[in-house]
Amino acid sequence: LSPALAERLLRRNRDGGRLLNLYGPSETIAATMHEVGAADLLRARIPVGRPLAGRDVLVLSDEGKPVPLNQCGEIWIHSLDMADGYAFSPASEQQRFAALPDRASGQAGRYRTGDLGRWLSDGVLDIVGRRDTQVKLNGVRIELEAIEATLMAAPGVRACIAAL
């Protein structure tokens, strides 16, 4: 949610409704929530908030250790409604679904989102980017490497770059 869109939505709100920014990949549905207020419009990005009930959200270093406040790391999520894996992609499943135990329940199973984020000093999660080149277009995940591979297979193509 961009600050510009949040501002437009807050300006349109005449009936006292709330503007909520939710975050979560398809594998875990919504994992965090932040109620957007006027003060958020001064931020570079609207934060995605705090974990919802039944969710455990960590920001971890490449070594799998929690990073300090305001430090960037990869977001890992455990939730009660998390997918079990990918039916037709065991390689992706092994990469994304890890046996890192959940802190609250002790049960194994976390989802490695590929999103980069940081905990801000006010306790909310800020998304800062992606670890890989995956993008979403109209809600569909696209791997830019897959587009490049398809283009490279076309006759007469010697080089290409896919970007969004």
Image (cartoon, helix red, strand yellow):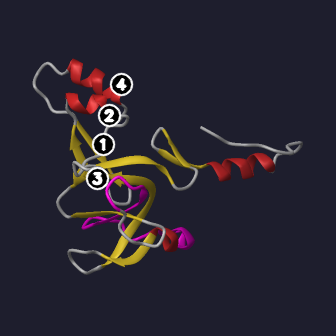
The earlier-in-sequence mark between 3 and 1 is 3
Disc 2 and disc 3: Cα gap in Å?
A: 22 Å
The earlier-in-sequence mark between 4 and 3 is 4
In this view of the protein, which residue sits in the foreground, 62 or 13?
62
Q: Which residue in the protein does label 4 denote?
A: 4
**Residues tagged 2 and 3 counted as in contact (Cβ below 8 A):** no
Q: Which residue in the protein does label 3 denote?
A: 30
Q: Name the amino acid type tagged 2.
A: Arg
Q: Name the amino acid type tagged 4.
A: Ala
Residue 105's disc is none
State the extent of the magenta-drawn residues as a range.
Answer: 68-92
**Residues tagged 1 and 2 counted as in contact (Cβ below 8 A):** yes
Q: Which residue in the protein does label 2 denote?
A: 43
Image coords of residue 150 (percent x, y): 73, 49
Disc 2 and disc 4: Cα gap in Å?
A: 11 Å
**Residues tagged 2 and 4 counted as in contact (Cβ below 8 A):** no
Mark nearer the viewer, 1 or 2: 2
Disc 3 and disc 1: Cα gap in Å?
A: 14 Å
Image coords of residue 11 (percent x, y): 22, 19
Q: In this view, does 98 lie to the left or right of 162?
A: left
The question of residue 58 being in magenta is answered with: no
Residue 47's disc is 1
Mark nearer the viewer, 2 or 3: 2
Mark nearer the viewer, 4 or 3: 4
Q: Which residue is drawn at 67% across and 52% down?
A: 145
